[in-house]
Image: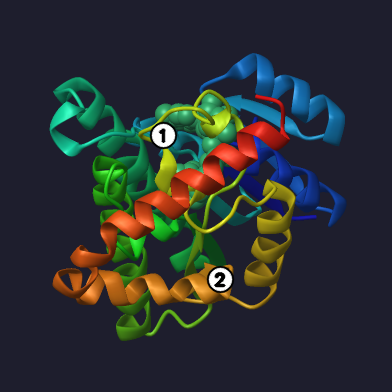
C-alpha cells in the first residue's frame, strides 16, 4: 500500500478526499492544524493523524522524510477572506498567502524531493475557480489562488523540461462547495462570489479529484462549464459592465440557498 498525505484533510473537501483515498487502499495521513479533528477522521478511516501547519516548510519536509512509500501529496489546506481587497487587514492577507500560496509551495517542494529521485509520484493542488478569474469580493483569496495555479502549472512544465515524466503535478479548480469554509458566510453579503455558479457538495469534487489522480491533468476546472470564467480573466474590461447583473444573480442564488437550508 502506498501513502497519501492530504493537507487540511480533517474537514470539508479534505475529509472527503481522505475517505476516498482510504477506500482505495492508501495509507492516508490526515495532516491538519486541527489535530482533534484530524484524529477523529483518522480513527474513522484507519489512517494516521498528523499535526501540520502547511506554512511551515520544515514541517512539510519532515513529514515527507518520515514516509518512505509516499505516492500522493494533496495540497488542500486553504483559507478564505471575503470583501473588497482594501478591507482585508494586513495580517489576514499575510495569513492567506502563508497558507494558500506558501503552503502549496512547501508541500509541493517537499513531496518532489521524494518523487523526483524515485521517478514517480503525484502532487494534486486544490486551487479554485478564483484561480482562473480574479473574483471581486474574494479578491485577496483570488490573488492567492492565481499564485497557486501559476506555481502548479509552472512546476509541471519544469518537470516536463527536466524530463521527469513519471512525476506529475495537477491543479483542480472547483467552484463553490458547501464546506466549513462557507458555513458562517451563507448570509454574508460579501460572500456572493462563492454562490455565483451554484453550490456543490464536497463529495462531488472529491469524486472528480479521484479521476484526476487516476489521470493527471495540468488543470482541471469543475464543473467544466465554469471554464468560461477564463474569459473574464482575459478580458476584464469587457466583463466590467456586466458586474451589476453578475452580482445580482449571485446574491439571489446565495439567498435562495440560505432559505432552502434554513440558515
Ligand atoms: N469551499 C469552497 O467553496 C471552495 C471552492 C474552491 C476551492 N476551495 C479550496 O478547497 C480547499 C479545501 O477547502 P474547504 O472548503 O474544504 O475548506 P475548510 O475550511 O472546510 O477546510 C480546510 C481545512 O484546512 C485546515 N487548515 C487551515 N489552515 C491550515 C494550515 N495552515 N495547515 C494545515 N491545515 C490547515 C483546516 O483546519 C480545515 O480542516 C481549499 O484550498 C479551498 O481554498 C474551496
Circle nearer the viewer, 2 or 1:
1
Instruction: Report if the beta carbon of the residue with label 2 is closer than 8 angstroms to ligand 1.
Output: no
Q: Is residue 58 above or below residue 26?
A: above
Q: Is residue 21 above or below residue 96?
A: below
Label 2: how many Cα within 10 Å (few below 14, some 14–19, many 20+): some
Q: Is residue 32 visible?
A: no
Residue 225, how many percent across, how many down? 53, 75
Question: Residue tagged by mark 1?
Answer: 79
Residue 119, how many percent across, how many down? 52, 73
The coloring applied to the image is rainbow
Q: Is residue 221 above or below residue 53?
A: below
Taking the image as shown, residue 231 lies to the left or right of residue 164, namely left
Q: Is residue 35 above or below residue 148?
A: above
Q: Residue at x 60, y 43 (%)?
A: 6
Which quadrant would the C terminus be assigned to in this image? Answer: top right
Q: Is disc 1 placed on a helix, strand or loop?
A: loop
Q: Residue at x 36, y 42 (%)?
A: 100
Which quadrant would the N terminus be assigned to in this image? Answer: bottom right
Question: Residue tagged by mark 2?
Answer: 120
Toward the viewer: 25 or 248? 248
Q: Earlier in the sequence, mark 2 or mark 1?
A: 1
Q: How many marks?
A: 2
Instruction: Report if the beta carbon of the residue with label 1 is closer than 8 angstroms to ligand 1.
Output: yes
Toward the viewer: 168 or 225? 225
Q: Residue at x 37, y 58 (%)?
A: 246
Q: Residue at x 59, y 29 (%)?
A: 180
Taking the image as shown, residue 109 lies to the left or right of residue 261, namely left
C-alpha span from label 2 to label 1: 30 Å
Residue 90, how many percent across, how many down? 15, 24
Residue 13, how many percent across, how many down? 63, 43
Amino acid at each position: 500500500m502506498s501513502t497519501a498525505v492530504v493537507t487540511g484533510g480533517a474537514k470539508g473537501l479534505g475529509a472527503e478526499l481522505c475517505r476516498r483515498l482510504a477506500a482505495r487502499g492508501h495509507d492516508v495521513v490526515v495532516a491538519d492544524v486541527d489535530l482533534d479533528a484530524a484524529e477523529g477522521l483518522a480513527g474513522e478511516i484507519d489512517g494516521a493523524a498528523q499535526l501540520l501547519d502547511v506554512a511551515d516548510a520544515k514541517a512539510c519536509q519532515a513529514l515527507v522524510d518520515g514516509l518512505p512509500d509516499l505516492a500522493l501529496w494533496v495540497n488542500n489546506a486553504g483559507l478564505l477572506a471575503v470583501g473588497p481587497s482594501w478591507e482585508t487587514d494586513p495580517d489576514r492577507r499575510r495569513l492567506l498567502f502563508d497558507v494558500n500560496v506558501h503552503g502549496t509551495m512547501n508541500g509541493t517542494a517537499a513531496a518532489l524531493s521524494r518523487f523526483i529521485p524515485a521517478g514517480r509520484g503525484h502532487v494534486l493542488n486544490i486551487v479554485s475557480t478564483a484561480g482562473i478569474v480574479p473574483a471581486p469580493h474574494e479578491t485577496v483569496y483570488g490573488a492567492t489562488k492565481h499564485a497557486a495555479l501559476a506555481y502548479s502549472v509552472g512546476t509541471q512544465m519544469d518537470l516536463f523540461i527536466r524530463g521527469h515524466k513519471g512525476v506529475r503535478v495537477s491543479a483542480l479548480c472547483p467552484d463553490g462547495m458547501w464546506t466549513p469554509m462557507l458555513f458562517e458566510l451563507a448570509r454574508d453579503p460579501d460572500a456572493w462570489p462563492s454562490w455565483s455558479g451554484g453550490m456543490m457538495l464536497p463529495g462531488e469534487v472529491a469524486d472528480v479529484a479521484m479521476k484526476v489522480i487516476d489521470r493527471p491533468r495540468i488543470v482541471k476546472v469543475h464543473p467544466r462549464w465554469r471554464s468560461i470564467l477564463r474569459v473574464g480573466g482575459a478580458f476584464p474590461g469587457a466583463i466590467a459592465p456586466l458586474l451589476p447583473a453578475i452580482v445580482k444573480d449571485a446574491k439571489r442564488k446565495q439567498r435562495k440557498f440560505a432559505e432552502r437550508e434554513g440558515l
